[in-house]
Amino acid sequence: MSTENQDALIAKRMQHALTRVTKTVFPGRTNHHNTLFGGEALAWMDEAAFIAATRFCRKPLVTVSSDRVDFKEAIPAGSLIELVAKVDHVGRTSIRVHVDIFLEHMYQDDQHKAISGSFTFVALGPDRKPIPVLAGLAE
């Protein structure tokens, strides 16, 4: 595959892999400050990133790292959140996905970024060893 064709394939698959997940922050998901528990936010981010990465390459993947997750604003119970996951880098055997969590107050027309971070995945073959993420993908 030529570099030009590979770049076009990556761009097309990145667009298809864009993932949006909307959730409600119920009290059972909060900490003692009545805001979204950080561990819950990380789990939701990892899941959204996993979905985007899987949609990109349709291969078995494992999370190998999370990079700099910024908690810019506490998310109170009773809020709506939207997770937006975008593939932003494709390596030979790895995919990095950037995830933003947008906060919406339930009874107001507003939405703004509250949390962001990146997650890296590696594609695995049947022997559980890394495989190229682009192998076998149609142009």
Image: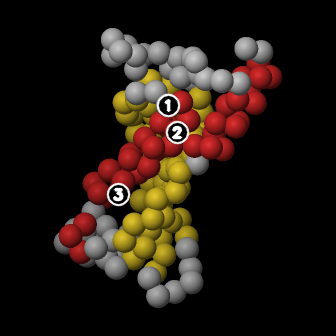
Pick the residue in front: 44 or 113: 44
Tags 2 and 1 touching, CB below 8 Å: yes
Check the image and report above or below for 20 versus 36.
above
Residue 45: x percent and y percent?
A: 41, 51
Using the numbered discs, state the Cα–Cα distance from disc 2 to disc 1 in whole angstroms: 6 Å
Mark 2, Cα crowd under 10 Å, few <14 / some 14-19 / many 20+, is: some
Q: From where the camera sits, is residue 114 visible?
A: no
Contact (CB < 8 A) between labels 3 and 1? no
Residue 132, position as x, y percentages in the image: 53, 17
Left or right of 40? Residue 103 is right
Residue flagged by tag 2: what amino acid is it? Arg
What amino acid does circle 1 point to?
A: Arg
**Residue 55 marker:** 2
Gap between marks 3 and 1, in whole Å? 25 Å
> Is residue 110 depicted above or below 74 in this figure?
below
Secondary structure found at label 3: helix
- The image's mark for residue 41 is 3
The front one of 19 and 69 is 19
